[in-house]
Image: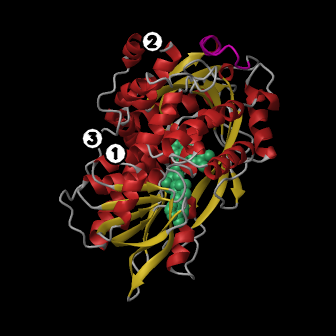
Amino acid sequence: MSREQHIQQLRDGSIFDLLVIGGGATGCGVALDAATRGLKVALVEKNDFAEGTSSRSTKLVHGGVRYLEMAIKKLDRVQYNLVKDGLRERGLLLKNARHLSNRLPLITPLYKWLDVPYVFSGLKLYDFLSGKQNIGHSRLLSRKEAMRRFPRLKAEGLKAGVLYYDGQFHDARMALSLALTAEQHGATIANHVAVSGLCKEDGKITGAELTDSLTGESWQLTAKGVINATGPFVDGIRVMDNPTAAKMLSASTGIHIILDKDFAPPETGLMIPETEDGRVLFVLPWEGHALVGTTDEPAEITEHPKPLEAEVDYLLRHVARYFNLQVSKSDIKAVWSGLRPLVSDPKAADTAELARDHVIEESGSGLLTIAGGKWTTYRKMALDTIDHALKQFNLSAPRPTCQTANLPILGSAGYDAKGDLELSKKHGFDTDVASYLNRTYGDQAEKVAKLAEGGIGKRLVKNHPVLESEVLYATRYELAERVIDVLARRMPLALLDTEAAKQAAPRVLEIMAEELGWDQRRCEEEALLTEQRLSEAL
Ligand SMILES: Cc1cc2nc3c(=O)[nH]c(=O)nc-3n(C[C@H](O)[C@H](O)[C@H](O)COP(=O)(O)OP(=O)(O)OC[C@H]3O[C@@H](n4cnc5c(N)ncnc54)[C@H](O)[C@@H]3O)c2cc1C
């Protein structure tokens, strides 16, 4: 359905079982869980799907190696169980979103002999905890083998390496695909629609006032239950509900920089186990580039956080420490920042203690807030939230238990990892384009390829596999409403290469303007907004 059709459904006066606020990992996951249980659900996102934190992650599907270390050091069962849950969810995500995710080998270089048994046994335990969902066995690498696998690693003082496995995924498209899969199961979904107020009767929430961010029009929607899944922004909605609500969230920023692919080992990530502030840092191959991240700095909660110079310097400093090649600011192709939602449980005795899991809170007027967690565990968070919602809002779902453990998300069911060969043969695509289309769209890639036959099959920009036909596909079938929705979330271009995204922008605008019938004023507005996002902060 088009966005207009979704909005019509949101405005037609019908009563929804649930209204989910926020179209990131959490909200899209919650909407999918609810829709697959047979509930009538509406999902609204103020900006674009995944425009918040959910397109700005390190793109790892993981249990958290560092959390495991903490669990062991502090004999902390909660942390231990969190790692176990994360590893289980890692396996399910890799299975249910096969085209958007992959297993990734990672090397940890070790420069002290004492670290070798310590890190190796920790990673062996990590394998063990994943049980049936194990995706590969960790093993020791000799110094020679580590250097052979990644010749650019600093050789001086290197003692050995450990090879282990985690998952990697395309976060922005994952959120979109969850929303579109929810739509397939009957959910009404709309991006660029904000909750601008909550409606109440006798002190109980009965729905919300929605505002179309593109037209400014507002209306009311009635729902038996309202779920606040707005990530770093949950307190904004909680204060809408109760102006005196105590904050449950603080935020820190994490930035990533993108470098040329030569900075990452081929097909393998690098995990730097101990930065100067005791964190782990990753250098990962991603979409033909090297993704380096991340930082952790206290931050204001804003929609488009700006990366700080000091954070960029921190990342470059660490890359330089582990590589035998010079890296400078001029090597950076793109940089972007995301807000980490750090949640404290308002019911916990010590509220200064940050929750390491997700927190579900029910307010006096019935607002259900779900916050915290991580991308990898979105499905478990959704399951817990809908289990809670069924009881809290007294809903009877046709299928009362969670349905998502074995549910392929859109694009995954018929995905063939070798489908790129067929795409090349049938449509004559270059190998990089065919591989990209196959991984990005899964069993929907043929539709993008068909559109390319209609005279818009060219690359949007040289040296990147992104095509003009994707713009049309995103506009027609993936609810892209703005040029930046396409450049930053339907395709990864803006996150990979700012200059290339700037070059591609006019053609993206042209295709969207024709498809959506934009007038001169809208075209000017789009050009300005795109320039702003690409030059200031994504
Ligand atoms: C730097 C960094 C790296 C990370 N790396 C990883 C990783 O590798 N693996 C992993 O598993 N996790 C990772 N995470 C964590 C993960 O990204 C987050 O936990 C997850 O994306 C949070 O999703 P969310 O939906 O809760 O929040 P968001 O993605 O921020 O979504 C909330 C949405 O609510 C919308 N919203 C706000 N107000 C309103 C309103 N009034 N009406 C409608 N909509 C509204 C916002 O526009 C936003 O899109 C990382 C996080 C950071 C910051």
Q: Is residue 3 left or right of residue 523?
A: left
Q: Is mark 2 within 8 Å of ligand 1?
A: no
Residue 198 on the magenta span: no
Rate crowding at label 3 as few (under 14), some (14 to 19) or many (20 or more) other CA atoms within 10 Å. Answer: few
- Is 27 on the left or on the right of 268, as rendered? left
Between 314 and 14, the residue placed more toward the observer is 14
- Name the side, left or right, on which 174 lies relative to 422: right
Q: Amino acid at mark 3?
A: Asn
Residue 492, quarter of the rendered image: top right
- Residue 246 x %, y %: 57, 77
Residue at 55% in and 79% down: 245
When the figure is inspected, residue 283 is found, relative to residue 520, above or below; the finding is above
- Residue that label 2 marks: 428
Disc 2 element: loop
Q: Earlier in the sequence, mark 1 or mark 3?
A: 1
Q: Which residue is mark 1?
A: 181
The Cα–Cα distance between marks 3 and 2, rounded to whole angstroms, is: 35 Å
In this rendering, which labeled residue sits more in front, label 1 or label 3?
Answer: 1
Q: Position of residue 483 (x, y in %)?
A: 59, 43
User: Which mark is first along the chain, 2 or 1?
Assistant: 1
Measure the alpha-carbon separation of dots 1 and 3.
13 Å
Q: Which mark is residue 406?
A: 3
Disc 1 residue type (three-letter): Thr
Residue numbers of the magenta segment: 145-154
- The type of residue carrying mark 2 is Gly
Q: Residues within 10 Å of mark 2 (few under 14, many from 20)?
A: few
> Is residue 5 in view from this perspective?
yes
Q: Secondary structure at mark 1?
A: helix
- The relative height of residue 144 versus residue 68 in the rendered view (above or below) is above
